[in-house]
């Protein structure tokens, strides 16, 4: 019984911990990208004419740009793709709002 507990502790420590940290980092990037999406969708649907404040957008994109640079230095393809795709989607939303 004592051996089983040791094996489970080793598994959680060595396998589950790094996976959870990577997953949380990836989810954090998605949540940051989604910070301006509800407002942009509301503007596109005509529910409001108030755009997100410029400081919110600039700080969000600045943070994401820093995470993108960190991912590039670490050669983390998953975060590079996630952040890059998020930039594209947000840019498309803004183009649709400004050029409708």
Image: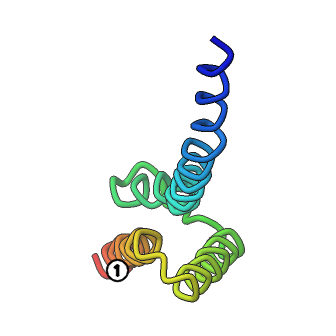
Considering depth in this image, is 60 or 51 the residue closer to the camera?
A: 60
Where residue 33 sits: x, y (%)? 51, 63
Residue at the farthest top position? 1
Residue 83: image x %, image y %?
A: 46, 73
* Image quarter of the C terminus: bottom left
Identify the residue at horizontal 46%, vertical 58% (top origin): 37
At x 68%, y 68%, the residue is 56
Position of 19 with respect to 56 (left or right) is left
Q: Residue at x 61, y 36 (%)?
A: 12
In the figure, is residue 60 to the left or right of 15?
Answer: right
Expressed as whole percent of the image width and height from the top left, the position of residue 81 reads 37, 74
Q: For the residue labelled by badge 1, is the local secondary structure a helix, a strand or a loop?
A: helix
* Viewer-proximal residue among 11 and 27: 11
The part of the image, by quadrant, that contains residue 13 is top right
Instruction: Identify whether 88 is placed above or below 20.
Output: below
User: Within 10 angstroms of label 1, few (less than 14), some, or many (20 or more) residues?
Assistant: few
User: In the image, is 74 to the left or to the right of 48?
Assistant: right
* Along the line of sight, the residue nearer the viewer: 71 or 48: 71
The quadrant the N terminus occupies is top right
Front-most of 75 and 41? 75
Which residue lies under the disc numbered 1? 95
């Amino acid at each position: 019984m004592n051996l089983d507990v040791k094996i489970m502790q080793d598994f959680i420590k060595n396998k589950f911990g790094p996976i959870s940290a990577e997953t949380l980092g990836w989810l954090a990037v998605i949540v940051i990208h989604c910070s301006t999406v509800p407002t942009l969708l509301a503007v596109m649907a005509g529910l409001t004419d108030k755009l997100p404040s410029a400081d919110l957008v600039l700080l969000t994109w600045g943070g994401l740009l820093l995470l993108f640079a960190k991912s590039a230095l670490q050669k983390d393809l998953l975060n590079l793709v996630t952040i890059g795709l998020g930039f594209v989607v947000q840019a498309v939303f803004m183009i649709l709002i400004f050029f409708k």
